Amino acid sequence: MGCLFCDILSGKKNGHFIYEDDLHISILDKYPIDTGHSLIIPREHHEKITDMKSSDVGEMFSIVPKIAKAILDATGADAFSVGQNNGRAAKQIVPHVHVHIIPRYNHKGTIWTKRYIEDDAELSKLAEKIKKSIT
């Protein structure tokens, strides 16, 4: 069985890219918990964070502040949560390491499990807005 994120990385499937470097990409989550929910994904496939070298984990987390700031700037969110799941029992849906950045809004409250399907056109517009906010 293939890997959804590897398919996005190879161009076989579409993703709403907001950031790329030599080692990582960041895309909008197709089933977001809230507007601007994004993922940081290493280009190298690893199922769990424990399969990665510590230095690679550090590199991945080092870009969280940059992506989170851009998401906050672009969406007007009040705060954000960071999440990283490992294994089916932890609710890791795609077995490829990724970090969730979930914007939070004071007027909505904090919900962890509610997800909705985002419209593709809206995701494209939001991805462009966040890309422009990355410094």
Image (tube, helix red, strand yellow):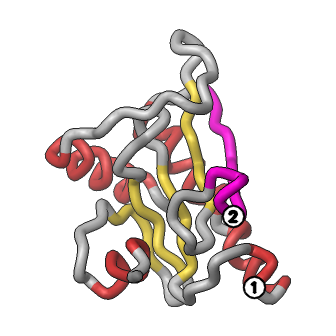
Three-letter amino acid code at the position of disc 1: Met
Q: Earlier in the sequence, mark 2 or mark 1?
A: 1
Direction top: furthest residue: 107
Q: Is residue 16 magenta?
A: no
Instruction: Give the residue displayed 42% in from the left and 74% down from the top.
Output: 5
Across and down, in percent, residue 21 comes to: 49, 82
Asked if the stretch drawn in magenta spans residue 84, the answer is: yes
Q: Position of residue 10 (x, y in %)?
A: 32, 87
Residue receiving disc 2: 87
The percent coordinates of residue 110 (x first, y second) are 63, 22
Left/right of residue 98 with respect to residue 31 in the rendered view: right
Q: Secondary structure at mark 2?
A: loop
Quadrant position of residue 74: top left
**In the displayed structure, does residue 70 sit left or right of residue 6?**
right
User: Which kind of residue does numbered mark 2 sit on?
Assistant: Gly
Q: Point out the image quarter for the N terminus.
A: bottom left
Name the residue beneath numbered marker 1.
Answer: 52
Instruction: Say if mark 2 contacts mark 1, CB within 8 Å.
Output: no
- What range is drawn magenta here? 78-91
